[in-house]
Image: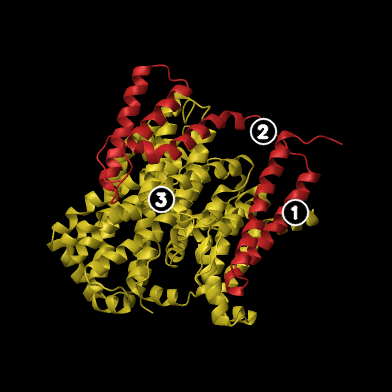
Chain colours: A yellow, B red
Amino acid sequence: MNPLDLIDMGAATHALTMLVSEPSYWLVVFPGILIGLVFGATPGLQISMAMAIFMPMTLYMDFLQAMLFLTAIFTGGSFGGGVPAILMNIPGTSSCIATAFDGYPMAQKGKHNEALGLALGASTFGVFLGYIILFMLMKPLSVMVLKIGPAEMFMVILWGITLIASLRGTHVLKGLIAGFVGLLIGTIGFNEEGTLRGTFGNEYLLDGVPVVPAMMGMFAASELFRLVKTNYLIEDEASRKVRLTLIMKGFRDAFRHPIIMIRGSMIGIFIGAVPGVGSSVSNLISYMETKRRDKDPESYGKGNPKGIIASESANSSSEAGSMATLLALGIPGGGATAVMLAAFAMHNITGGPQFIREQMDVVYAVIFANFAQVFLLIILGIICIPLLASVVKIKMPYLIPSVLALATLGSFGLTGNLSGPITVLIFALIGWFFRRYDYSVAGAVIGMLLGRMAESSLLHTYQISGGELSYLFERPIALAILALMILSLFGQTVIKKIKAIRK
Amino acid sequence: MRGLSLKKSANFGVLFAVTLFILWYLFDAYSALASIENLILIGPIAAVTLSLCTAEFIRYLREDEIEDPNQESFRDVFPAMVIFTGYILSLDFLGFDLGTTLFIAIFLRMHGETKWKMILIYSVLFGFLVSYFFSQMLPYPMPMSFLPTDY
């Protein structure tokens, strides 16, 4: 089959003509990326929040311009979220969790410049490759996503959690406990059947624990408590310098690992296309895969640059994956694409097969504009990184309360009442105990993020199958994911035992 | 009988708290509605997690825990936890502007900053500017003492 058959050449030409003939489309891209960078890089502010705040502005734009503006915020934010993950161990978004695993240890070693450069390089590559794949595979991907049912979704969720657990190395049991406790916390509140569980009679918990404030507490506040006795994020004064040459070196270094970036981007786009799971899981799967295939897996979590590349390439390409689901099926993959869906509605447009069939030129124009956004992101990223990286020069007694206050204000912004700040506080304390006694904080957070969806997926599977276990054998994708999950949990132990027996 | 190390006791404490939470949540969900639909995820996950907790408990009994001397102690972080708790719980009546200013000022003083002028300027500037920024960006009213609000 000729690959060009997958592309509607007429629509592609029309899309290019639209973008070139109307310069006003480009006016919104620059501020969009900047907004995304600032919101992504500020602990407590989310990409979806930025998009929601600025969405009313799109009322004064036509549909294509609105899409360019919102995807620009998305692109800027997907890189911006990695900045606090590297500098403060605070993933700006759930999609940057794995970035913090090696990014923060690198920053602590004084390699923050290189780490930020690596993240920028991998992010831009991820966005670029993601949109190329989206361009090429828009039609087949939309068919494939339809084959993902609740059984497959449940398996992907469980896989994500077990991956986190197996990351803990010597504390696999504690990792699993943390992940499953997170999963249980994620189900607090009303279930789909209208039954109320675990709320202590508190009305704020009817819709469940506010997950993002809980994440901010578990990751950020608990880590900041740990640092109260330190003077600077990086103790060595010489290492605290922000150098553009080192950032550029990191940027170039990312391209020395093309396989990791391509693999991460592929994982990102395919997992990103699964509604609701998206970049929260893709960065972890990419990280785990890279670690599993590496000759020195023990170096991960201690500042291995490949960990950042794996995570950032996957979370950035997830944007294209979630856009595929949104455009092709009209289903949002996460918070950011949910806001985009609202923007669709504001312009009286419904995503789905009909939209693709009738407005393929607009879809291609969004994709082409994102290629250009990649280059703008490189320029803006390089300009902004030195400013953002200056955080390492701030004394910890100033940095700690400032970030805690930012997280508190941000959590209020997410919930609209004081339940957000209180959630940050409670989960900060839980997070500190978990971290101190080797329970996986990341596992617990991922569990909380996915708990509700795991329950609905399992319930839907039960309803579809009528409780028959044999239904699973009719779902080859679900079985394949199950096999991968078992492999990721027990694979290394089995291989080690086989090697020991052979010796 | 050999006494438990501090690390081991704390580990037991955390594991015990986790186990209690799982048992309570399972009981609460079961009391709410004892149906397959309600317990389809909670039941199996709680059962698996309780088994894992038991396995971890047995591991604690059999293996010695080695204390990492570089890890911070509870005594080190306790004051920071107390100030942060006070900050969050006082937001409703102090508001974000005054609450944030006081939180930062107290934190700075307690963690070695001796220059009063610096403490005052930084905490007031940060507390009021950031609160003002968020109040302008967010669509709902925020509790404030001095800045304008509809809260």
Residue occupied by mark 3: A122
Instruction: Report the residue at 41% width, 60% height from top.
Output: A318
Residue type at the position of mark 1: Ala
Secondary structure at badge 1 equals helix
Q: Is residue A198 left or right of residue B123?
A: right
Give residue A181's position: percent from left, percent from top. Answer: 60, 55
Give residue A379's position: percent from left, percent from top. Answer: 27, 45
Residue type at the position of mark 3: Ala
Number of callouts: 3
Q: Tell me the quadrant of the picture where the N terminus of chain B can be found.
A: top right
Residue type at the position of mark 2: Asp
Q: Nearer the viewer, mark 1 or mark 3?
A: 1
- The disc label shown at residue B55, or none: 1
Callout 1 environment at 10 Å: few (<14), some (14 to 19), or many (20+)? few
Secondary structure at badge 2 equals loop
Q: Nearer the viewer, mark 2 or mark 3?
A: 2
Callout 2 environment at 10 Å: few (<14), some (14 to 19), or many (20+)? few
User: Are the residues under marks 1 and 2 on the same chain?
Assistant: yes
A241 versus A177 height, above or below: above
Contact check, label 1 and label 3, Cβ < 8 Å: no
Q: Chain of mark 3?
A: A
Instruction: Report the residue at 72% width, 34% height from top.
Output: B6
- Please state which of residues A72 and A418 is positioned toward the viewer in this rendering: A418
